[in-house]
Image (cartoon, grey):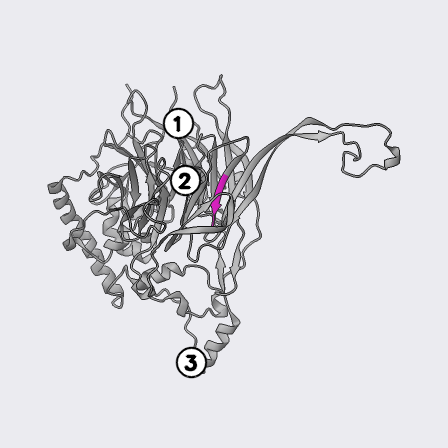
Amino acid sequence: MSEKLGTESRSEQTGDEKQDTQEKEAVVPERAEEVKLKAKYPNLGQKPGGSDFLMKRLQKGQKYFDSGDYNMAKAKMKNKQLPSAGPDKNLVTGDHIPTPQDLPQRKSSLVTSKLAG
Amino acid sequence: MAGAGAGGNDIQWCFSQVKGAVDDDVAEADIISTVEFNHSGELLATGDKGGRVVIFQQEQENKTQSHSRGEYNVYSTFQSHEPEFDYLKSLEIEEKINKIRWLPQKNAAQFLLSTNDKTIKLWKISERDKRPEGYNLKEEDGRYRDPTTVTTLRVPVFRPMDLMVEASPRRIFANAHTYHINSISINSDYETYLSADDLRINLWHLEITDRSFNIVDIKPANMEELTEVITAAEFHPNSCNTFVYSSSKGTIRLCDMRASALCDRHTKLFEEPEDPSNRSFFSEIISSISDVKFSHSGRYMMTRDYLSVKIWDLNMENRPVETYQVHEYLRSKLCSLYENDCIFDKFECCWNGSDSVVMTGSYNNFFRMFDRNTKRDITLEASRENNKPRTILKPRKVCASGKRKKDEISVDSLDFNKKILHTAWHPKENIIAVATTNNLYIFQDKVN
């Protein structure tokens, strides 16, 4: 006789009571995670899903080195160092002038996909 | 066990094939970005980050080998998109194929739409298995014959040749999107299609490339007021006037193009009410819908957010009719998932042909199936370890906390770099295509 394969877990139904207790239990780990995050990044914006986050999403894309931007920014900064790209999640891409150090590697030439191999 | 099929017997999934390189060092260009069966299921297309499309064709069923269905072999491969540069903004336009959608077959050739962030292309894939030979004025190699040597009239005839599959771009639909295209969807009228970016949705005619109609525009007058973006959009499978789009806030809007030219005002708004006391920093991010798919019947739609899959009845806007937890154990890991950006991963989901089972991917190369009728679910793994054809896949289980049983894997051991974002289900059979980072797995149900 073949065994039934598969885990027999009941998928969540939308019954009210069950959802209440489950969500209360769920919220505790989520809130605990939030506390952890705030501890690591105290400057994190109040509105996480708000402008900053979405603006960053809209401007996704490799920003390339533009000598005009770079030289103008350098002139403004005078003696100060140009800020380089950091892992700061609040940094809106548009404000950052890429420096020669930030340049990505050149793309390799186009070859046939390995899936077709 | 995810069930399907007439007898209601539980099906067993078996390894069938795996495509792609074995080595762990994955070149960025090889990252698979989309997988799609055509309407008959005979063809399976993949797109990757390098802008390439590979199409596989199912072998005709061998009558003597009745214990397995035809294998998928390479049919055609071509470079769909190439990297471009936006000089004005000093931004690169990635060649990554975001989506492929097949047109229903009308004649001998096959057509598909493929898109990157900015440009949609209509590709024609046609077969050539004969060529004309015996021209009157040309030699076989193409050189023209000396006309004075031509003394008789020779009419060329078609002779068989080795099958050649050619892909050619027939239409290029460009310059209509300021933001990044996330979806394309072909209308049931088979004449028009929509393309959606973060803030706008455009309607195109397949024959016309120099203009498109904007049908949704959610760009605020002041970008500081931006609160949500469009994450996915799809036409209804039967009603050519209806489409839906999902947002980063977890809502889905259904629009009727008969109501007005600009569908900024939705006809229906699907949103599950949230208990404000449950709200956390992560709530909005994990509620962002990464994929929306209508059922084949057109009566339901499925949405995927970070932790769950929801089935909505189009007649009920205030809550989904079914909710399935994909990997609830990640809720206590949201902080690190935010730090490593995994919380922003966009998982897709798909229906089986009869709309009875839904499937979606997870981490550690796991993927999940939920049977809507039996309410049972299963976790399977795409791994080269189960490499022999017709090997039945063993169900997997993640241990959220406490004592880990034998064969279970703990949450902390999961490999978050091994994500299954793209899966596809054959429209008629129990054959599934599952994409890991750079490999394509094909699984079939056990045929006796």
- Spatial separation of the CA atoms under disc 2 and disc 3: 56 Å
Residue B311, compared with residue B117, is above or below; it is above
Residue B258 x, y percent position in the rendering: 34, 44
Q: Residues within 10 Å of mark 3 (few under 14, many from 20)?
A: few
Residue at the left extreme of this rendering: A17
Task: State the residue at coordinates (35%, 45%).
Answer: B257
Q: Which residues are magenta?
A: B112-116
Query: Considering the numbered disc 2 on the image, is that residue within a helix, a strand or a loop?
Result: loop
Residue B240 x, y percent position in the rendering: 37, 39
- Spatial separation of the CA atoms under disc 1 and disc 3: 65 Å
Amino acid type of the residue tagged 3 in the rendering:
Lys
Q: Using the image as rendered, state which of residue B230 and residue B388 is in the foreground.
A: B230
Circles 2, 3 touching at the beta carbon (< 8 Å): no
Instruction: Please tell me if label 2 and label 3 are on a single chain.
Output: no
Q: Residues within 10 Å of mark 1 (few under 14, many from 20)?
A: some
Q: Which residue is mark 1?
A: B429
Q: Quadrant of the N terminus of chain B?
A: top left
Query: Considering the numbered disc 1 on the image, is that residue within a helix, a strand or a loop?
Result: loop
Q: Name the subunit of mark 1.
A: B
Q: Is residue B277 left or right of residue B120?
A: left
Task: State the residue at coordinates (56%, 43%).
Answer: B170
Instruction: Please tell me if label 2 and label 1 are on a single chain.
Output: yes
Amino acid type of the residue tagged 2 in the rendering:
Asn
Residue A116, compared with residue A109, is above or below; it is above
Residue B197 x, y percent position in the rendering: 40, 53
The numbered dot on residue B187 is 2
Q: Quadrant of the C terminus of chain B?
A: top left
- Spatial separation of the CA atoms under disc 2 and disc 1: 24 Å
